[in-house]
């Protein structure tokens, strides 16, 4: 017989995870569509009673986002400008109704290549806090997501938080999503850019693209091409001529591989310019 449990403390949840196999239920916005009309055969661990897992906290070293924190919580919480890309991504996850219940950790654990939260968190060098009854560990987000619908989560573990190191929560950032329509749409490609500008020069750049590889990727060649560029320089040229070896887009109903590859470069340009407060109408066609 399948079990259903709704613990009210993390310790209780971790003890349950240690004694049986469970599917974790958070906002349910990926969980229920994946389940469809099939009968439930797995035990369900409903984490919606874990108040401790919701909210954003500032510690001496990190910004700590509880696993159950919703996209609406992200939008509403005052955060440094480096989080603007994450806030913009939050506003792009489905509709407002979805954003009100869907959690950040659910987006990461579902491990869809089209998860909008991933590029915006990767440019912040976020890591994932994993806890079991026996241990606690942290993994860089880029290592936690292993592939399409695959993560490094172990059976007795759950994600309890996402942490952003404060040293990376600097600069300005932007997120650009490309979909077949403007609203309530799965990404064809999306880009996040975080830039640190000192004396009119780009001192540091973090750029990531999603939906163009099994896991969203940082673009090292574009980041290198941007570092040291004056913000008034032809940044479009720097992005357009930089090597992008990290992407391996597939063709599907939403677009061809070639279209995705070209579109990715264009939305990176737009994200970079938006992070610098420059407007799209100045972007070369
Ligand atoms: C209509 C609609 C539109 C959508 N549009 C978008 C979109 O535009 N962009 C986008 O990125 N996503 C979109 N989504 C997907 C979804 O809303 C997000 O991925 C959301 O963040 C998932 O969070 P959740 O809390 O609902 O996760 P759930 O559905 O509860 O769980 C998702 C997965 O994560 C696991 N899980 C959840 N929390 C934990 C935890 N703490 N530890 C370990 N495992 C955990 C669950 O077991 C499950 O496998 C959409 C969904 C719907 C229904």
Image (spheres, grey):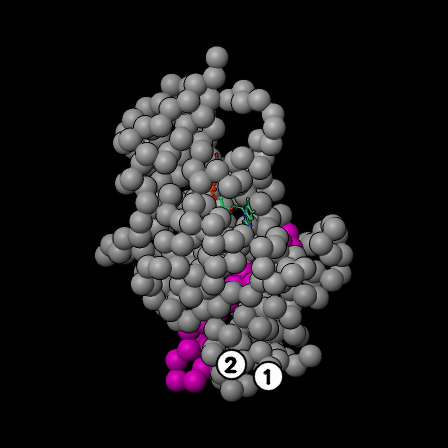
- Which SS does the magenta portion mostly show? strand
Regarding residue 141, the answer to whether it shows in the image is no
Residue at the extreme front: 97
Residue at the extreme bottom: 232
Q: Position of residue 148 (x, y in %)?
A: 61, 42
Q: Position of residue 34 (x, y in %)?
A: 58, 35
Is 198 within the magenta?
yes
Image quadrant of residue 222? Answer: bottom right
> What is the CA distance from the residue labelled 1 to the residue labelled 2?
8 Å
Regarding residue 145, the answer to whether it shows in the image is yes
Closest to the observer, 118 or 49? 49
Mark 2 CB in 8 Å range of ligand 1? no
Mark 1 CB in 8 Å range of ligand 1? no
Q: Position of residue 129 (x, y in %)?
A: 37, 42
Q: Which residues are magenta?
A: 190-213
86 versus 153 height, above or below: below
Residue placed under numbered mark 2 in the picture: 278
**Disc assigned to residue 282:** 1
Image quadrant of residue 220? Answer: bottom right
Q: Position of residue 39 (x, y in %)?
A: 57, 22
Q: Residue at x 48, y 59 (%)?
A: 91
User: In this image, 148 relative to 249: left or right?
Assistant: left
Q: Residue at x 59, y 73 (%)?
A: 269
Is 284 within the magenta?
no
Circle 1 Cα neighbour tier, 10 Å, few/some/many (<14 / 14–19 / ≥20): few
User: In this image, 36 relative to 253: left or right?
Assistant: left
For the C terminus, the image quarter is bottom right
Q: Residue at x 37, y 34 (%)?
A: 47
Kindly indicate whether the residue at mark 2 contacts the one at mark 1 (C-beta within 8 angstroms): yes
């Amino acid at each position: 017989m399948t079990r259903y449990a709704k613990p009210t403390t993390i310790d209780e949840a971790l003890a349950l995870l240690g004694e049986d196999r469970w599917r974790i239920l958070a906002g349910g916005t990926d969980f229920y569509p994946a389940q469809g009309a099939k009968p439930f055969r797995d035990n369900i661990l409903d984490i919606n009673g874990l108040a401790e897992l919701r909210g954003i906290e500032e510690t001496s070293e990190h910004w700590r986002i509880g696993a159950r924190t919703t996209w609406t919580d992200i939008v509403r919480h005052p955060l440094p400008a480096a989080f603007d890309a994450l806030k913009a991504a939050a506003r792009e996850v489905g509709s407002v109704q979805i954003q009100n219940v869907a959690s950040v950790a659910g987006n990461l654990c579902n491990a869809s290549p089209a998860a909008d939260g991933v590029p915006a968190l990767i440019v912040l060098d976020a890591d994932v806090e994993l806890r079991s009854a026996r241990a606690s560990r942290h993994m860089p987000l880029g290592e936690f997501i292993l592939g399409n619908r695959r993560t490094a989560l172990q059976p007795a573990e759950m994600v309890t938080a996402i942490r952003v190191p404060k040293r990376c929560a600097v600069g300005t950032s932007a997120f650009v999503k490309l979909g077949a329509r403007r609203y309530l749409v799965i990404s064809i490609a999306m880009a996040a850019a975080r830039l640190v500008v000192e004396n009119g020069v780009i001192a540091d750049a973090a750029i990531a693209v999603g939906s163009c590889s099994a896991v969203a990727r940082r673009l090292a060649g574009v980041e290198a091409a941007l570092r040291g560029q004056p913000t008034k320089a032809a940044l479009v040229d720097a992005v357009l001529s930089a090597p992008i070896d990290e992407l391996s887009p597939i063709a599907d109903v939403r677009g061809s591989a070639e279209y995705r590859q070209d579109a990715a470069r264009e939305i990176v340009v737009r994200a970079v310019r938006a992070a610098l407060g420059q407007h799209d109408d100045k972007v070369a066609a």
